[in-house]
Image (cartoon, rainbow, N blue to C red):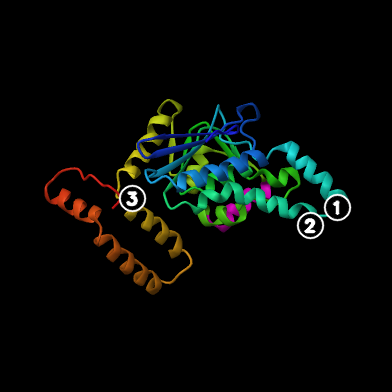
Amino acid sequence: MAYEHIQLTRDRGIVTLALDRPETRNAMSAAMGEEVARAVDEVREDPEARVLIITGAGTAFSSGGDLGMLARDAELSKDAGASAVAGSLRAFYSRYLAIRSLSIPTIAAINGHAIGAGLCLALACDLRVAVEDAKMGMTFAKLGLHPGMGGTYFLPRVIGLARACELFFTGRLIDAAEADRLGLLNRVVARDEFTATVRALAADIAAGAPLAVQMVKKSVYRGIDHSLDDMLDFEAFHQAITLCTADAREGIAAVMEKRAPSFTGR
């Protein structure tokens, strides 16, 4: 499938989706969002996909929402009221956040600045790896805007309420080192090691038993909003399912035979 605003590539179970408007530092437009949603559908239907990397073309991850689009929405709201644009904003969010519907793990490879909605997109991923000179920020207040793209949902869950409030209220930018200290990132990597590090992490995930990894992802997110007893029942049921798979038999045999497992997703 051809894309104009993103790139979608595959290599041995690792799928990479790159936002591809480098001339705008990968500003997020409605047209780009439509392509992201289409790409997510394509990845979901790919039985070989094991992990999805989201990154940006050029030197930025994403500068956030396209300013021209926001300016047009501001003019429309001025004349027609907030309700005139709320629906289109909600649809805009949903297209990008379609990545949350994937059962496979997702990695945000933050290759440069991730600002506003761009940072929200990174937070929507399961894991985040950033290059050491990247800057990040929830800069909505600096634009006179309320956050969107799930920012007020994701950020407090990742770094805690008080720290999230500070970043939202001030709109200040933080560097990768501070983002790492806050718990926003999994890893910070030198630029010359960045691509290899992200690739190695994705390969480690792709080497795992696909059904088990996908079930773990589902359970981890479910556990945020459920009790321990609920999760023990949920885990017992899903662990029993995986015990019935060929991958479980292969994994156990590989450990006993002191060799690397070869998983097939069955």
**215 to 18, vertically: above or below:** below
As rendered, which of 265 and 193 lies closer to the eye? 265
Q: Earlier in the sequence, mark 2 or mark 3?
A: 2
Residue 172, percent from left and from top? 64, 42
Question: Cα distance, mark 3 to mark 1?
Answer: 49 Å
Q: Which residue is outermost to the right?
A: 79
In this rendering, would 251 be left or right of 102? left
Q: Residue 83 carries which label?
A: 2
- Identify the secondary structure beneath mark 2: helix
Badge 2 vs badge 1, beta-carbon distance below 8 Å:
yes
Q: Which residue is outermost to the left?
A: 257
Q: Tag 1: residue type?
A: Ala
- Identify the secondary structure beneath mark 3: helix
Q: Which residue is outermost to the bottom?
A: 229
Question: Cα distance, mark 2 to mark 3?
Answer: 43 Å
Q: Name the residue under label 3.
A: 210
Badge 2 vs badge 3, beta-carbon distance below 8 Å:
no
Tell me the residue at 53%/44% (across/down).
122
Q: Tag 2: residue type?
A: Ser
Say which quarter of the image contains residue 13. top left
Say which quarter of the image contains residue 198. top left
Whether the magenta-drawn stretch holds residue 4 is answered as no
Find the magenta span and give its range: 160-170
Tell me the residue at 74%/40% (across/down).
69
Question: Could you tell me what secondary structure mostly forms the magenta stretch?
Answer: helix
Residue 30, percent from left and from top? 67, 42
**69 to 158, vertically: above or below:** above
As rendered, which of 266 and 201 lies closer to the eye? 266
Q: Tag 3: residue type?
A: Pro
Residue 99, percent from left and from top? 52, 48
- Identify the secondary structure beneath mark 1: helix
Packing grade of label 3 (10 A; few <14, some 14-19, many >=20) is: many
